[in-house]
Amino acid sequence: MSEQVHIIGGGITGLFLAYHHTKRGDRVTLYEEADKLGGVIGTKIVNEGLVELAANGVLLTDEMKSMLDDIGLSPVYPNQAAKRRYFFTNQKLSRLPISIFTGIRLIITVLFKKIKFNKDQNFETWACQMFGNSVTKNIIEPAIGGVYGTRLDSLQAESIFSKWEGTGTKTILQELKKNKSKTYGTVSFPQGMGDLVSHLVQYLEPKIEIKTKFSKANLETILKWKGKIRFSTSLKNLIPILGDHIEPNEVPNLLSITTITRFGKNHLTKKPCFGVLFGKNEGIRALGVLSNSDIFPGRAIDGLHSETWIYPSAAKTGDSITWESILEEDRKLITKIEDSPKAVYVTSWNGVFPAYDRKLFLFNQKLDSLETQWLSEGINIRFFGNYRKGIGLRSLFESTSGE
Ligand SMILES: Cc1cc2nc3c(=O)[nH]c(=O)nc-3n(C[C@H](O)[C@H](O)[C@H](O)COP(=O)(O)OP(=O)(O)OC[C@H]3O[C@@H](n4cnc5c(N)ncnc54)[C@H](O)[C@@H]3O)c2cc1C
């Protein structure tokens, strides 16, 4: 039976929700505060090429492929060179920054060691105990930091691997297999990630009611709406909406991120690659860098190389230093040469990421119990977004499909 669904928040999560409900034949109204849809995702076309404002790519799955067919969008697949990924640890670039012996121990851990979370341990302590110091420092720290926008000691394993059972009964391999749907690597789109938003909007426009510039209705009013209520605002915007339903000490921590897209003549690494992830205490303030024009064709005009650097916004410690100078200093530590860019584009996002820590884990439990409580009162309300089941677009697509 066709149901009325109210979706509040028209970022990619809200668009994915609208897509899935439309496929099921539901009547959807999408409410967006801004005058445009897509939230943080967007692509700026500049003289030198494309600049992504947030996500640079999406992990392609069969379900995602079928959605792309529906909306008439072809993915752009990465170049072969994108298979090459570097870690910068101990002041040098390396594709596998651990010894063969440590590598064998890592494989044995993944195969046989049972996962046990500890609520009192931060991710760094937990990982050192689980995998040992070398793997934590040289692989996990750079890999996780670049994706989650902060360092391991500000994160918690239970929150990041929220789909895993951490009671000491399952191995990592068992959990990886359980959650694995087939993937075809990271893809983008001809005009960048903005294409995904514009094609989804074109597909949805004739099928749903879209209310942009929607002036904030308060929660008590929304709870009276007839039909399903689905929140897909960012976590930052959800907190004030929830008001008294959460205590001040339950408010989760938010992270601020700055991304810098740099166009220049010279490559960052000798061989083209996906990018470089940075360990802690290497003197580099960035968490990671993507070599855009090595990954996807058409990201920079002929002869230019494009890179996107990801920083915690706190890396800029004063008004007298510029993001450009921070980036060039970091870059020099890798290339060992002085260089100057052709153009640099800076995007700063305030409170854009949830910190995947203990507080977020408890906050999600609170949201689960609010959902259950409201459902028992006949109000069908649910919360979706990158603070719930994973940070990336693939997780957002999958979590919004199954409800
Ligand atoms: C720098 C950066 C790089 C990233 N890179 C990748 C990547 O390469 N791959 C990947 O998979 N993911 C990546 N991500 C993660 C991914 O982009 C985000 O998790 C995702 O875009 C979040 O989408 P969202 O719709 O949940 O939130 P948002 O994009 O924040 O959208 C929320 C929407 O809700 C609206 N809204 C807020 N309050 C209200 C209200 N009261 N009423 C109505 N509307 C409201 C907002 O205006 C906004 O449009 C990256 C994120 C960032 C910031």
Image (cartoon, helix red, strand yellow):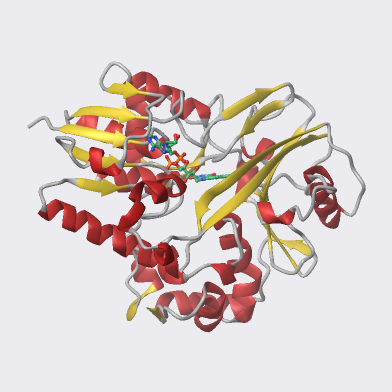
Q: Is residue 328 shown left or right of residue 113?
A: right
Tell me: residue 65, above or below residue 360: above
- Please tell me which residue is depicted at 17% across the width and 30% down the height of the picture: 26
- Please tell me which residue is depicted at 54% across the width and 31% down the height of the picture: 42
In this rendering, does residue 296 appear at all? yes
In this rendering, does residue 403 appear at all? no
- Please tell me which residue is depicted at 33% across the width and 32% down the height of the picture: 67
Q: Where is residue 74 in the image (x, y as percent from the top left)?
A: 45, 26
Q: Is residue 298 shown left or right of residue 392?
A: right
Q: Position of residue 281 (x, y in %)?
A: 74, 69
- Which residue is the extreme one toward the left? 1
Q: Is residue 192 shown left or right of residue 225?
A: right
Q: Where is residue 195 in the image (x, y as percent from the top left)?
A: 49, 25
Q: In which quarter of the image is residue 28?
A: top left
- Which residue is the extreme one toward the right? 338
Q: Where is residue 380 in the image (x, y as percent from the top left)?
A: 17, 45
Q: Is residue 69 shown left or right of residue 184?
A: left
In which quadrant of the rendered image does the N terminus lie?
top left
Tell me: residue 379, above or below residue 31: below
**For the image shown, how many numbered marks are present on the structure?**
0
Tell me: residue 297, above or below residue 140: above
- Please tell me which residue is depicted at 21% across the width and 34% down the height of the picture: 5
